């Protein structure tokens, strides 16, 4: 495996993830002010301005982590395995955004956060095999998804 980071790969994956995060938060702005403003929420929900910012920070950290793993070389099976897990994790994240904010299917979106959390644990494991620092960059996202699952469950329960 290549031990030197490829900054172009790190930049590309970071920009890709931040763009996805930006588009996701942009797409939900009207929902934040319409539907989400009027439903019952638990008292520990973060403010809207912080919510979008935390998502973008997590998307940036995910992009950096994926770029670090990608830098190790796609020829290695562990790198491919780690990035496959990462790709599925991104798909589940997008699916959660759609089911929670657009479709307003609270139970399904809660189940997606549980699945995402479990998949994220595997992603962290595989990132750690390839490059431990990349795995550590996913720890804030792991906590964020756990928090999101709890909030999602409480919103479903309260409504």
Image (spheres, rainbow, N blue to C red):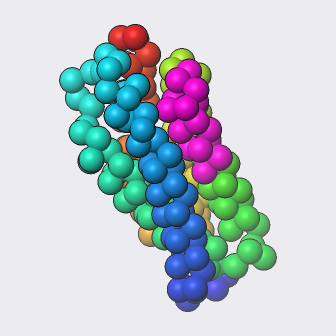
Q: In this picture, which residue range is highlighted in magenta? A: 90-105
> On the picture, is 131 further left or further right than 25?
right
- The x, y position of residue 139, in whole percent, is 40, 53
Q: Is 61 situated left or right of 74 in this image? A: left
**Residue 29 or residue 119, whichever sits in front:** 29
Give the prevailing secondary structure in the magenta stretch: helix
Residue, x 46% and y 41% (percent of image)? 28
Is residue 94 a member of the stretch shown in magenta?
yes
**Between 141 and 108, the one nearer to me in the picture:** 108
Q: Would you say residue 83 sits in the magenta stretch?
A: no
Residue that lies at the very extreme toward the left in this rendered image: 43
Task: Kindly identify the residue that appears in the image at 63 percent across and 73 percent down.
Answer: 70
- Point out residue 1 in the picture as x, y percentages from the top left corner: 67, 81
Is residue 60 visible in the rendered image? The answer is yes
Residue 81 position within the rendered picture, expressed as x and y whole percent measured from the top left: 71, 59
Q: Nearer the viewer, residue 72 or 115?
A: 115
């Amino acid at each position: 495996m290549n031990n030197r980071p490829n900054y172009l790969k790190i930049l590309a994956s970071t920009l890709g993830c931040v763009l996805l995060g930006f588009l996701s938060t942009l797409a939900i702005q009207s929902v934040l002010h319409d539907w989400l403003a009027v439903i019952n929420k638990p008292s520990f929900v973060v403010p809207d301005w912080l919510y979008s910012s935390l998502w973008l920070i997590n998307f940036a950290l995910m992009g950096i982590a994926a770029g670090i793993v990608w830098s190790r070389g796609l020829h290695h099976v562990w790198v491919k395995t780690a990035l496959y897990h990462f790709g599925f994790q991104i798909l589940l994240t997008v699916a959660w955004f759609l089911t929670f904010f657009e479709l307003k299917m609270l139970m399904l979106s809660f189940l997606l956060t549980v699945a995402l959390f479990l998949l994220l644990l595997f992603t962290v494991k595989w990132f750690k095999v390839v490059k431990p620092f990349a795995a550590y960059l996913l720890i804030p996202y792991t906590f964020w998804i756990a928090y999101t699952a709890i909030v999602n469950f409480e919103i479903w329960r309260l409504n």
